[in-house]
Image (cartoon, rainbow, N blue to C red):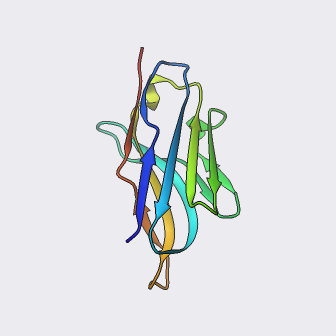
Amino acid sequence: QVRLVESGGGLVQPGGSLRLSCTASGNIVSINFMGWYRQAPGQQRELVAAITSGGSRNYADSMKGRFTISRDNAKNTVDLQMNSLVPEDTAVYFCHANLRAAGWGFGADYWGQGTQVTVSS
C-alpha cells in the first residue's frame, strides 16, 4: 500500500519561513511527478508547485520567487521551502504524487493527509 506522509507545518509569523517534507512509501515502481497543493478554508485546492523526476519545476504565480520545491528520487521525498510567508499562505498543504505502484501498469494520483500552515502574528 502506498502512503504519502507530510511533516513540517505549523505556525509562523509573516515574513518567516517553513519547510515542508513529504515521503512516499510502499510498493512503488516509479514516481512520475511530485508536488504540493494547498487548500484554504472555503477555497478550492490549488497547485503550489510540482517537480518531475527529471527535475523540471512548475510554480503557481503567487509562489514564484518565494517557494522552492526539491526532490530526492532515491528517497522518494519532496520538500517545499517556503520563504517570505504572508497570511494569505495560510492553508492545509497536501503532498501529491503521480506514481506507479507494484502490480499496476499505469500511474495514479496519491495524496497525503495534509499539514496545516498558519501565517499569523
Q: Nearer the viewer, residue 54 or 58?
A: 54
Tell me the quarter of the picture where residue 1 sits: bottom left
Residue 34, given in percent of the width and then of the height, sits at: 55, 58
Q: Residue at x 43, y 36 (%)?
A: 9
Residue 97, how many percent across, how many down? 49, 61
**How many numbered marks does the figure carry?**
0
Residue 4 % position (x, y): 43, 58
Q: The C terminus is located in which quarter?
A: top left
Does residue 10 appear to the left or right of 22 in the view shown? left
Please report the residue visible at 50 percent of the width from the left and 18 percent of the height from the top: 14
Task: Determine whether 81 is above or below 84 in the image.
Answer: below
Quarter of the rendering containing residue 82: top right
Residue 72 in the image, given as x and y percentages of width and height: 64, 56
Residue 19's place in the image compared with 1, above or below, is above
Q: Is residue 86 above or below residue 4?
A: above
Q: Residue furthest top?
A: 121
Give the residue at x 70% y 63%.
54
Asked whether the viewer can see residue 119, the reply is yes
| Looking at the image, residue 118 lies above or below residue 102 | above
Which is more toward the observer, 25 or 36? 25
What residue is rendered at 56% in x and 55% in y? 77
Residue 46 visible in the picture: no
